[in-house]
Image: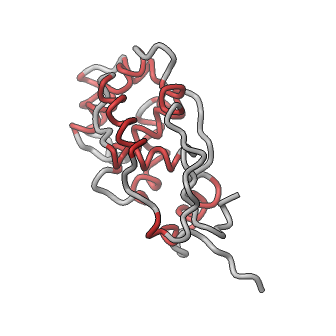
Amino acid sequence: MTEVIRCSWAGLSDPLYLAYHDEEWGRPVRGDDRVFERVTLEAFQSGLSWLTILRKRENFRAAFDGFAIPKVAAYTEADVERLLGDAGIVRNRAKIEAAVANARAAMELPDGLSDLVWKYADPSAPVPRTMADVPAVTPASTALAKELKRHGFRFVGPTTAYALMQAIGLVNDHVEGCLARA
């Protein structure tokens, strides 16, 4: 029997986490609304387990109108209050307000959010042998965070930017031999 190799963070017990690792993480995601969703969820994840966010992802999608940038950009204080009352999502005022501000900032990007973010792709990044070889921050994630902040984005520091880069395939940090590496 052949041993299945996965990145150690995927664990082995939660089917949702395994599916995310095997089918999503590190795979290219393009399109402004899809990238906005990931920017938003990475910001909400800050200080929490990613599994917490995965378990609430469908609730987030419903609460934030499918992460349609124009819709979220039009949110008012009443929408912020509605979201603060939604037990299906992470109810953090600063993060909710950042999501609205980020949607408004995304609306102002001349070439769109997806194109801006994908300028920081690094297909030549080395293949990590183990998770110990995977950085938390890179020069590219620092530059991406700085660029997003320059455009008015919030909750997008270098660590969050790198997590975004990993999640949407700007880098492929599946370890050597991982079944999802290819």
23 sits left or right of 150 in the view: right
Q: Nearer the viewer, residue 66 or 115?
A: 115
User: Horizontal and vertical percent for residue 159?
Assistant: 34, 49
139 above or below 126?
Answer: above
Q: Nearer the viewer, residue 137 or 26?
A: 137
At a point 27% along the width and 29% down the height, the residue shown is 80
Q: Residue furthest bottom?
A: 1
Q: Nearer the viewer, residue 165 or 92?
A: 165
The answer to which quarter of the image holds residue 82 is: top left
Q: How is the image coloured?
A: secondary structure
At a point 47% along the width and 13% down the height, the residue shown is 110
The answer to which quarter of the image holds residue 182 is: bottom right
95 sits left or right of 178 in the view: left
Q: Quadrant of the N terminus?
A: bottom right
How many callouts does the rendering have?
0
13 above or below 161?
Answer: below
The answer to which quarter of the image holds residue 3 is: bottom right
44 above or below 107?
Answer: below
User: Horizontal and vertical percent for residue 19?
Assistant: 61, 60
7 sits left or right of 84 in the view: right
User: Horizontal and vertical percent for residue 112?
Assistant: 50, 20
User: Horizontal and vertical percent for residue 93?
Assistant: 21, 37
